[in-house]
Amino acid sequence: MKKVLLLSLVLCVALSCLLTSCGPKTQEGEKNITVKITADGNTTTHQINTDALYLREALIEYFGEKLSFNSFDMVEVIDGIKADPGKGEWWMYDVDGTQAVKGVDTQPIADGNVIDFYITVFNP
């Protein structure tokens, strides 16, 4: 029983290390990212120069009061455009054409990234 428990613990630690090392890395220094925001059929494009490590930092620096988060720390308003949770709307985003699997607070950014924000509707 102790061997099984020890083996399980070792496997969990190894898997955690593997998953952590395989994800995107932060990039130190100045970077230029493109943020596109699509809502109601209109897309606006913003070029952001930042030394932030994560997307949330860069968004706060650039959008300021035109950006807010809900109680779950998800983007609620970006560039002054609000997703309507009453209609099941929420903001999603892609990084370089691939749907993000992290929240903006843990999404590393790198020079040249293209971030596409768009409203999607959750229909249970």
Image: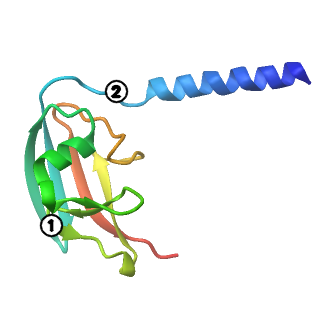
Question: Does residue 32 appear left or right of residue 4 in this picture?
Answer: left
Q: Pinpoint residue 103: horizontal percent, then vertical percent.
A: 38, 48
In the displayed image of the protein, which residue is found farthest to the bottom?
87
**Pointer 1 local density, CA inside 10 Å: few below 14, some 14–19, many at least 20:** few
Q: Pinpoint residue 82: horizontal percent, then vertical percent.
A: 23, 71
Nearer the viewer's eye, disc 2 or disc 1?
1
Q: Is residue 30 above or below residue 58?
A: above
For mark 2, give the secondary structure: loop
Q: Amino acid at mark 2?
A: Lys
In front of the other: 86 or 121: 86
Residue visible at 34% across and 44% down in the picture: 105
Q: Amino acid at mark 1?
A: Gly
Instruction: Report whether residue 66 is seen.
Output: yes
Q: Looking at the rendered structure, which numbered label has been put on residue 80?
A: 1
Instruction: Report whether residue 96 is seen.
Output: no
Give the labeled residue for mark 2.
Answer: 25
Q: Return the disc, 2 or 1, that comes first in the chain's sequence.
A: 2
**Pointer 2 local density, CA inside 10 Å: few below 14, some 14–19, many at least 20:** some
Q: Pinpoint residue 17: horizontal percent, then vertical percent.
A: 54, 23
How far apart marks 2 and 1 lie (CA) works out to 30 Å
Write down the quadrant of residue 41 in the picture.
bottom left
